[in-house]
Structure formats: C-alpha cells, structure tokens
Image: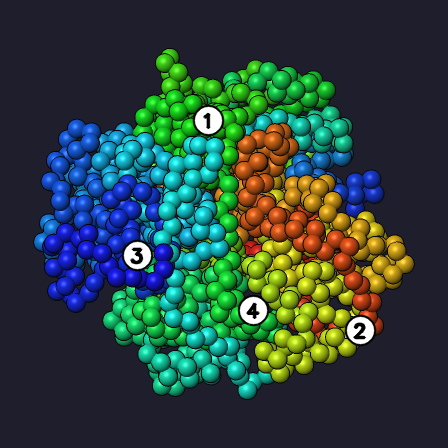
Amino acid sequence: MSAWLSQIAKEPDEETSASIRLAGVHLVADRSGALYWPEEKMLIVADLHLEKGSSFARFRQHLPPYDTKATLRQLGRVIETYEPERVIALGDSVHDRSAWDRLDETDRSEIETFAERMRDWFWVAGNHDPDPPAGVPGRAVDSLAIGPLLFKHEPGGVIGEGQAEIAGHLHPAARVIGRGGSTRRPAFAYDQTRLILPAFGAYAGGLCLSAEPFGPLFAKTSLRAAVCGRSRVFTVPAKSILGWR
Amino acid sequence: MNAPTALPTTPLPESFQTWFDAKGWSPRPHQLALLERAEAGQDCLLIAPTGAGKTLAGFLPSLVDLAGRKRPRMGAVGNSPLHTLYISPLKALAVDVARNLTMPAEEMGMGLKIETRTGDTPASRRQRQKRSPPDILLTTPEQIALLLSHVDAGRLFGNVKRVIFDELHALVTSKRGDLLALGLARLRQLSPDLVATGLSATVADPDALAGWLVPQNSDRPSTADIVTVSGGAQPDITILKSEERMPWAGHMARYAYADVIKAIAAHGTTLIFVNTRAQAELVFRELWSINEESLPIALHHGSLDVGQRRKVEEAMARNALRGVVATSTLDLGIDWGDVDLVIHVGAPKGASRLAQRIGRSNHRMDEPSKAILVPANRFEVLECQAALNANYARAQDTPPIRDGALDVLSQHVLGMACADAFDESDLYEEVRSTYPYRLLTREAFERVVQFVATGGYALKSYERYARIRQRKDGLWRVANPMVAQQYRLNVGTIVEMPVLTVRLVSAKQAAQRSKNALRGGRILGQVEEYFLETLVPGDSFLFGGEVVRFEGIHEDNALVSRTEGGDPKIPSYAGGKFPLSTYLADEVRAMLAEPKRWNELPDQVADWLRIQKDKSALPGRDGLLVETFPRGNRHYMICYPFEGRLAHQTLGMLLTRRMERARAKPLGFIATDYVLGVWGLADFGKLIAEGRMPLDELFEQSMLGDDLEEWMGESYLLKRTFRACALISGLIEKRHPGQEKSGRQVTVSTDLIYDVLRQHEPDHILMQATWADAATGLLDIARIGSMLQRIDGRISHQRLERISPLAVPIMMQIGKEPVFGEARDQVLEEAERLDEDALLAEAMIDEELR
C-alpha cells in the first residue's frame, strides 16, 4: 500500500478520529479539534479563547458565562482519552490580555491540575495573548520546533525541506455540499507541509476555508480538510470544500 | 352594527359637514359610530372590508377634536401639541395615509401639522419632531418603542388623545404586536385619557383583538367596543381551468402561464400574488418569455432594492402597469392604482390570507373583487377549492394572539430603564395590563429584569458589568449612557437572516475588486448570506428578473455581473413560506373523504382520487392514512396528515428516530404541506403488519416528550429560533455603536452560545423563550400535538405492492428538494467516500504502472 493511503486508514481504537501524515509524522485529528502526536505523547490545541464571554461582558453583552468551563471540560475529556505527557496551547489561549485575571478559582485550579500531570506544558504566544500567562503553570514560548514540526500561532512561515508547520489563528471551518444539503463544521486544514488546527474554544467560532486568508497558505489541489463531524472526523478533498479556489 | 338607518342630526361640526357636502359625500354610519365612541372616551375596534373608508373613520374623531382645539405650545408636561398617533405595520402605508389625510385637513383650512416618522426619516427631522412635535404623527411600532425610551417621552406623549392602530390584525400576531402592546400600556401611563382605536380586516376572533386595545388589569377580561361593517360584494373567484395537463408536483405552475398572460391582457391592472420570492422571480421571468405584446409587467418583493420597489409602486399608482408579480410585500392596504384582477399562483395557504389578497383588487366595497386561483399541482387544486368554499362561506382562519414573548419583554424593560427609573412592581402591573402579557407571573417578570441587568445566570459573574442597576431608592435605572445608545441601535423585533448587498459590476471590475468598482456598482437588492454560500463564482441565479453571474464576495457585498443564457439557479430565500392553515387542512381532508364533493374538482383530479380509492384508500377526515410499499431497493412509508410542511418536518424527525429504534433502518424523509414520506431499508409494511412496529405506538403522543427534547437539542431549527430570541432580547447585538464596519468581528455565533447555554443552564429564561417560540414557529409542535390527539386510535394502514396514486406527487419531489434532515454527517461521509474512491482509482492506476 502506498504511503498516502495510510492517510485514510483509521486507528482501530480511535473510531471517531482521523489520521494525518505530515513530514513523515503520524498525527491524530480528534473530533474535538485537538491534535495528538502519539510518538511524542503530545496534545496540541489552538485558540482556546478562554474568558471570551467575560470579555464581551465588559461591553455589556452578557453571553452565558460558561465558555471557559465548557472549553476546559472538553480539554479534560481529550486529556482523559489520549493521556498525553506534553501539551501545546498554540496561542490565543485567552481572549484578551486581562483575561488571566478574570479566571475564576475553579477554572484556574483545573488548568493547574491539568498542567501538573504533564511533563511539559507550552503556552505559545498569540495575537490575543502576546504576554506570558499570569498565575498558571507552564512555559511561555513564541514558537516551538520538535522534530520536523514547527509549532507557531500564525501560519505562513518559511518551511524548510522535510519540515512542516503546525499553526492556529485562523479558526478553519469547511462547508461541504452533498446531495442532502450542505454542512459547515470546524476542520483541520492541511496539505503536505502545513496544518492549521480548528479553534478549540467554545466561543471561538470558525472561518470558512473559502475566505481569503487561506488562499495563499495551501497548494490549490492538495488541500485536505479533516472535518469535525458530529459522529467522527471525515477527511474530504479540496474539491468537496465549498468556495476553495 | 349593520345596515345604516336614517341618520340622526349630524354630530359633525359645520366645517366638516360643509366639506362632505362640497364633495357630494356623506359620512358613513360606521364613521359616525367611531366618532361617537371616541367622544365618549371609549376604545373601539372597527372591523371592515377593504374600501369601507376605514382610515377616515379612524381619523375623523381626531380631526373633529382638533378643529375645536387651541394648539398648545411645547413646554411643560401636558403641553405637547401631539394629539394623535397613527401606527401602521408598513412604512409605506404611513406615508400613503399621511398624504390622504393632508388633503381634507388642508381643504378644511385646519392648519394642522401632519408628519410621518419611520426608519427612513432623516435624523435632523426626527430631532425636530421631538422638540416641536406635529399634531398628528404617523409612524411604526419600532419608532414608538424608540420614542418611549427617551427621557422626554413624558413631555412628548403627555397630551396624546387618540392612538389609531391600522391593520391591527396583521400587527398583533407577531412579536411586533407584543412590543406595540407594551408601548400602548406605557402611552396610557403617560396620557391616561387616551382613546385607542383599532382598524382591522375580518378576523377569526374579534374579541381577542378588541381585548388587545384595552387595559387588562381586572380579573375578568375587558374588551373594546366592536363596530363591524359587514357586507362588501361577494367576490368573483374562479380556479383556473386549463386545457393543459395538471402537474403532479412542483410549485411553479408552468402549465398556466399562457392563460395568465391572456388574463392580464384582458384586464386593466392585474396583481399576481405568489408565496415565495423564488416563485416571484421565476413567474416573472416566465411571463416575460411569452409576453409577445410586451405588456408592462413588473416585479415586487422584499429583497429588491427599496428604490426599485418605489419605482414599481409609483408606476402602479399612475396605472402605468398591466401586471405586478408580488409576494406578501403588497398584501396590506395601500391604494396603488386600479387593480381589477388578482391572480393567485400557488396554494393560498389560508382562507383569511386569500380574502385579504383578493381584497387588493377593486377598492370599492360595493363592487365584487375578481380573482383567479392557479394551483401549481393536484394537491393544490384541493386546497384552492377549499379556500374558495371558505371564502364564499366567509370563514376566517387568522392565527390567534399568542402569549407575549419574553425576549420582547426584555427589550422593553431595558427601553423603560433608558426612559426613566422604574419601580419593579409598578412596571410589572403596567406590563400585565397588556393583553399578550396579562397572564405573566411576577416570578417570570423578575427573571426578565435580572436577565436585562446581568444576563440572569445562575453563575453571577457579571454584576460589575450590569446594564441596569437598582438605585438606593429601589428604582431600576440604566447603568450608563452607552447602554441606552446600544438599546436604540438594536430596537425592534424583526430579525432577518444575515444578508449581503447584491451589487452589479462588470466581470472585469469584479476580478480587480477595486474600491472604485464597488462604489460604481449598482445595488440590485439583498440576498441571504446562506444562499450565497451555496454558490461558487461563475454560478448564475435569477435576481430582480434578470440572470446574473456570481463573481464573488467582497466585504459585505455580493458581486454579480450581467450574463446571458445559462441555466440559472433560483434564489431560495428563507422568507415567505407559510404553512397550510389548520382550517384549510380540515377542509381538504373533508373534501377527500366525500366523493360526492369531487364534482367541484377538475376531471383530472377527480379521476386521480377515484383511482386512489380503488387501489388503496382515502385519507379520512379525522384519522390518518399510512401507506407502505416497496419501490426500487427501498421501502416507503407515506402518511397523509395535511398539517403543513413545518409540522411535517418536525414529525419526520421524530418518526425516523422511533423507526430507528424499531430497527426499520429509515434513510431519509421528505415533507410537503400535505404529505410526509419516509424511506428506508427494512420492509416497513411487514414490520407494521407483524406488530413489530405498531403504528399506534409509532404515533403515540409521548413522541412530544423525551424524543422531542433529545432531538431539539441538536436541531438547527431550534438554533435559528434561539438566534432570533438572542437578538430581540439584547443578549447579542444586531449593531454595536461605532463598530458597524467591523460588524462580523464583534459577534459570537449564536449556535455556539446556544450549545454552551444548553449544556450549563438549560432552564435559562432565554431557553424558555426559545421553546415557547418553537411551539408555534418553525417547529409547529403545538400543531403536531393536536394532530396526534386527533388520530389517536384512528390510524389505518394500507400495505401495498406498489406506489398509490396519492403518493405520486411526493415521490416525484424526492431528489428535487433537499432532503430534510440533520444528520449532516451524511454529507461529509459522501465527500469522504468520493475522496477514497478517487484515491483507490489512483492506486489502481499506480499498480498498473508498476
């Protein structure tokens, strides 16, 4: 079997996730929007946007104040499933600079509990959180290179031979059209050298792959989307993604 | 009050009598009756057909009162010259009525200031109107809410003597009606002596409408006096008799266009009503394609640019048009030219709705209106016949007035806090004096106030960001001026789907996407964002009667260019799909059940029913017919509830869930206004016959319990309902001060909010509001409830070897309409399989090459 056929092979014990091969590395795209690197026991999540709800409340829009709890609950579930030893939060972990101060005690201690179980916890800087986090464990970094993979918040850097870039920032979502209508879901967007994670945060939202920022980032025909469906992750080709040019 | 008798000595002042005499007119009895009621300080509802002089009847008491009045000067409370408010559901109607009112006022030399105020009124004039109000102000419910939220509302409205509600029947059944009812209660606080007058077309429940006009403080319901003008000539309605073959399915009625053109040519001005904007586009285009005499036929629907619509209206008023294809935008009573024929393409959906549309032709009540109904398929023939019978019987099926919505109340509470500090108990009593909120509990009201203050969550983390706060004296007041500004930008209850402006550019300009190109591009109108998301650049669609090519999206513009030919996709706008009314549904079932009545129907249709009777059975009037048969490699179950598309969709979702549990392996379903069809892999007929899927269990009323709850959580229809509640209640903003330009950045998707709220606080007040809407709105659950009750113990199963005649229409719709379903993962699975197939195909080539 050729190497690329393994792209669609499913992990026997992970029926709801999809397998992605990038720069020779085997990665698992989880339905929650998290990415797992089994070889390194490493979990990657992007764009948590914690405290987005309270950020809006400052402008007197009272969104349900449970977004941080919902996001952390989901993160807890993923950690339970994969039992990682290392976690990378790929930037925009909080929605604004003062958000760390607004975390309530339960949420803060939940993050601490998560981090204490890990060998490493990396907070990659994002445009919403350029400063190192206050009052939570973990190492603040601008970017991170592990093996052939380069982790950074904003996609679009130069990628060396045999390497690949893993980024967040854009919150990719794919609209897919079929006979039964169309559906729009968060998605991992990737080709041979780059992967962009969907946003993990409960209020983070998504940007359609047809939007302009994605155009220059991927080769026209080799883009794929690992779409987070309700039941599992579906791997769809560029031609099924609406508006991809 | 009926036939006019000899008039008593006229109660009219001399100048009025002189004016009437000069015109050669005499006041009609109902006009004098309203004058008498108003002078006695009695609230009153006038129910009259089109052409009865309703508007003058409404204004006559004001004009008479104003004639004897010394104009106050704006100053202290009670000195505002604003005497009469006129509130209409349509901006255009307010403008039109102002014009008609100014004439008599000027001819009688009354020196009155009569002004309109709508969303289109320039800001400078709105400011001036507050400083120096007119005597009579003609406006809309949203403007009333806005004005009431200002600190000087008391001064402005303190002297109002009369409030006139035009087309009240159309206002009260929506959330706009709730907002207006709350506004009326506040107006009564500001000016306790005011007299309310409602003007309405005939409705099913006049007492409720009369109750809406008066305060409901006491234990027993109170109502306004009702003055009814009966009569109007019997309309002349026919169903189009065509030589062409009557289609089994579809909504476009192509077979009839040649006859429609003939009818237009034979009349002065014809209004052609359709049910959806997509139908309007198609009918317009098809009529022009066979319009050999080049009769001037225009198009009018809500997505078109306002300027374009105004042009059509003006041309109509000048009688320069022979035909106008229109959606419900022309339903209400503006006098535009001499329409002498109404053609209704597609089923009328409701008896009252049809009566009103027909009333648009011939505005003189003593002459018959003329209408032709054009059913688009065989089931619609039955519905048209039922509507025609109802019309002759003068039956009415207007919807009842619902309980007031909590999202609207939230908006109003914030508005009241912007106007002035309020006492919670006082405001509660005021709110409860309105008809829609007369049963509101104190507890629910308190939760609404908490919601307005800080979101009303169990987790209280937003206290410091409150929008309203309780002062030391216990009164609630808006927390800062910014909140009032936010409120004013977001007032109103009309929630549109997100739309983009459609701009015509050249293909070259579109490619460059230059700013200049956008500035030069003509605006054709607006189209819902979700529709455009289904297009790829290069696709064409019908818009404003022309085929345009989609070039792309730039900011909030959809760029299109002119194009020739091609097979256009049709805009499938969200608006305009009314479900079949309960009354008509019952009539259709009654007609089906009585073969004697089939001679009213065209032969083709009667034959169809006769064959159905032989091959299967007829749906009974009260029961439910369920047919099962195999076809191809699938099994089908077809049910005939006739409860409307929305109820059928919900029913389909719930049924397929239960069928899954019975291991019937349902694959999908399709719903029309009349029929619900489910298909799947297992032999449905056998499962039913062998008692493994008993029909009375399948259709048990418990369906609306747990199953519903479980499904609703995931339902996008519920999410759409939630979105409307979130916008109206002010949970999220339609517009934010100073951020209009970056509009897309400042909102959080309501779907995400819904998911989080449902998980963490499922009994939040906004979730309750959403469920309340769902009962009557997009999910029509209330109707399924009454249907399940009706058919209990009366379900009959026909296990057939092949498709029945009655099942043909829905079987033909399969594959033509998007299948309704929410297991959208199917779509993804399809795409994935496509991918795998391609990969495997590539793999094979690879192998061969090796």
Is the residue under label 2 in contact with that under label 1 (CB below 8 Å)?
A: no
Does dot 3 land on a helix, a strand or a loop?
A: helix
**Gap in angstroms between the C-alphas marked 4 and 3:** 32 Å
Q: Residue drawn at (47%, 19%), measured in percent from left and top?
A: B463
Task: Name the disc covering residue B449, or none.
Answer: 1
Q: Residue B433 at x, y = what percent?
A: 42, 34
Farthest right residue in view: B690
- The answer to whether B711 appears left or right of B403 in the picture is right
Does dot 2 land on a helix, a strand or a loop?
A: loop
Q: Residue B59 at x, y = what percent?
A: 24, 51
Q: Residues within 10 Å of mark 4 (few under 14, many from 20)?
A: many
**Gap in angstroms between the C-alphas marked 2 and 3:** 61 Å
Q: Earlier in the sequence, mark 4 or mark 3?
A: 3
Whether residue B44 can be seen here: yes
User: Which amino acid lies under the numbered mark 4 shown in the image of this protein?
Assistant: Ala
Q: Residues within 10 Å of mark 2 (few under 14, many from 20)?
A: some
Q: Residue drawn at (68%, 69%), measured in percent from left and top?
A: B593
Q: Which residue is mark 2?
A: B802
Q: Which residue is mark 4?
A: B386
Q: Nearer the viewer, residue B439 or A74?
A: B439
Badge 1 and badge 3 both on one subunit? yes
User: Which amino acid lies under the numbered mark 1 shown in the image of this protein?
Assistant: Val
User: Which amino acid lies under the numbered mark 2 shown in the image of this protein?
Assistant: Arg
Q: Which residue is mark 3?
A: B30
